[in-house]
Image (cartoon, grey):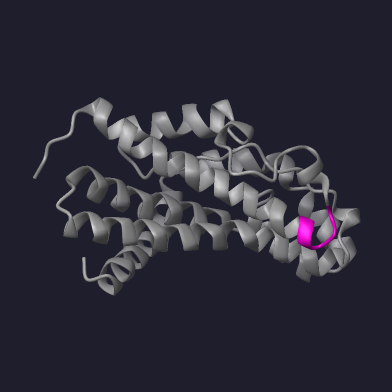
Amino acid sequence: MVDFSLGQKMILWVIPLIFAVTIHETAHGFVAFQCGDPTAKLLGRLTLNPIKHIDPIGTIVVPAILFFLGGFVFGWAKPVPITWRNLKNPRRDMALVAAAGPLANLVMAFFWVAVAKLAIDFHSVPFIYMGQIGVSVNLVLMLLNCIPIPPLDGSRIVASLLSPKMACQFNQLEIYGFLILVLLLASGLLTRLLGPLLQGLTSIFFRIFNL
């Protein structure tokens, strides 16, 4: 077993994380464009160029802190701007746009487990490690964004199922959303909530590819 240095581990974490948040946001913009909203495309955000999506806090600072603390690592990119009134069917399309991000992370998890499988066949230890990280990071982002706390994607899906009045009231929680997440993380509740789900899904992915 190769004992990677701290610097090597950080490099191997950075690549999957950046692509996880980049593709997550691009997926939102792509589905919004297909549903009638060109905002992301007009602003140059309908791209896989990570530079267009990186958020200094969410993509760099927070993941770095979580990495050093030793818990599961997650982050976020600059949200892709969506003009909801441009959508052809706002209530339905809101759910489709929101679901696109977590689904993109699910697809990326399959990609990274395939990378790990190929790396094993070619005896490439760094890529085995990177593939395992890619699976974990994308599954964490998928699970995290499915939590129905505004402004996470799960809350957009819930809002699309509520009456307009109830949805408006529910979305007002968005100003407290980040604080709620911080409290959940600091209290350990977030780890206890996502930990078993993450372990179970990761185990399923690795069994599928016989890893």
- Please identify the residue farthest to the left as the structure is shown: 1
Task: Kindly identify the residue that appears in the image at 25 percent across and 30 percent down.
Answer: 8
Placement of the C terminus among the 4 image quadrants: bottom left
Q: Is residue 69 visible?
A: no
User: Is 201 left, or right, of 19 in this rendering?
Assistant: left
- Quadrant location of residue 117? bottom left
**In the displayed structure, would residue 160 be above or below residue 11?**
below
Horizontal and vertical percent for residue 55?
Answer: 59, 31
Q: Is residue 205 magenta?
A: no
For this view, does 119 lie left or right of residue 134?
left
Q: Is residue 182 visible?
A: yes
Which residue is pictured at 85% across the width and 49% down the height?
83
Residue sitting at the far front: 122
Residue name at image x 32 percent, y 71 percent:
204
Q: How many marks?
A: 0
Farthest bottom residue in view:
208
Q: Is residue 144 left or right of residue 177?
A: left
Which residue range is magenta in the image? Answer: 33-37
Q: Position of residue 163 (x, y in %)?
A: 86, 69
Which of the image's four quarters has the N terminus?
top left
Q: In screen coordinates, is 205 left or right of 128?
A: right
Residue 170: x %, y % from top left: 77, 56
